[in-house]
Image: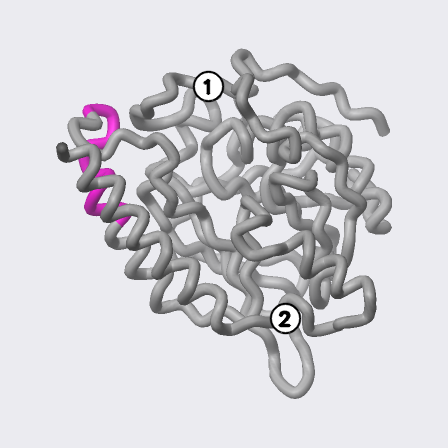
Amino acid sequence: MAIAVTAPLLLGAADPPAWTRPQVPFPIAGPITYVGSEGIAAYLIKTSAGAILIDGTLAENAGMIGRNIEKAGVRLRDVKLILVTHAHFDHAAGAAALKRATGARVVAGIRDVRALETGVPPGETNYGVIRFPKVEVGRGIRDGETVTLGTTTLTARATAGHTPGCTTWTMRIPARPRPLDVVFPCSVSVAGNRLIGNRAYPGIVADYRRSIAMLGTLHADIVLPSHPELADVIARGERRQAGHTTAFVDPTLLPKIVAKAKVAFDADLAKQAR
């Protein structure tokens, strides 16, 4: 099925070429397959009752993601849920086209629902407003709530800061000698967010601090971020396809990511305060 793509109202001219560079889908672990571009992640989770897609990435990537889903052996109509990590154009703009193509229900953090349904990102940034195609959200989710499809359950963890509704997803997959904990962390990078005097999001600093602290409490055998370079997802995928079945298993990775995020946040806050 061809996916009709609505172009974003404004595209960042300096966006990295990898964000739209096609990537062959590859298995990660258990029911999880990478179906995003080379530079922005989208993850497909196969269940006994259809499939779950995490993020739609850029609007112009929707057709590629649709083809990758089919290459992974899933019919588009069998995608039942689209989970949006947060309401920024590079992760949410493709959701509208993919929803039309699949008929899937969109689920997102409750504090990002308005932004997704208007196509206007929340908060204030130093790069202006980059709109994206609006998408109807079937369910706004809160911290600790779960989404279940078939026998597969994911838990939402509110990770506000990057956006008010930024949502980290966690799940457990069967493996030997023990099950593996998988974390899809929502970004805690500042990435142009105004930390001082943000009238549209006055609680942004406290939210960032809570979210970074919360991520530090999670255990993750496998970390699958929205920007794959943060966890070497593409390189790990190449090793996985070369026969290294545990290429993605690294319990030390999430603490390292969180520690770096805290240092970077403190530095950004100090810089903006000056």
Residue 35 position, x and y percent, is 72, 45
Q: Mark number for residue 89?
A: none
Q: Amino acid at mark 2?
A: Ile
Residue on which disc 1 sits: 130
For marks 1 and 2, give the one nearer the viewer.
1
Q: Quadrant of residue 249?
A: bottom right
229 lies left or right of 142:
right
Residue 83 position, x and y percent, is 56, 44
In the image, residue 149 above or below residue 112: below
In magenta, the rendered stretch is: 199-208
Residue on which disc 2 sits: 173
Q: Residue furthest bottom?
A: 177
Front one among 222 and 252: 252
Q: What quarter of the picture does the N terminus occupy?
A: top right
Q: Residue at coordinates 40% horizontally, 17% vertically from top-left?
A: 129
Residue 171 position, x and y percent, is 55, 64
CA separation in Å, label 1 and label 2: 36 Å
Q: What quarter of the picture does the C terminus occupy?
A: top left
Element under label 1? loop
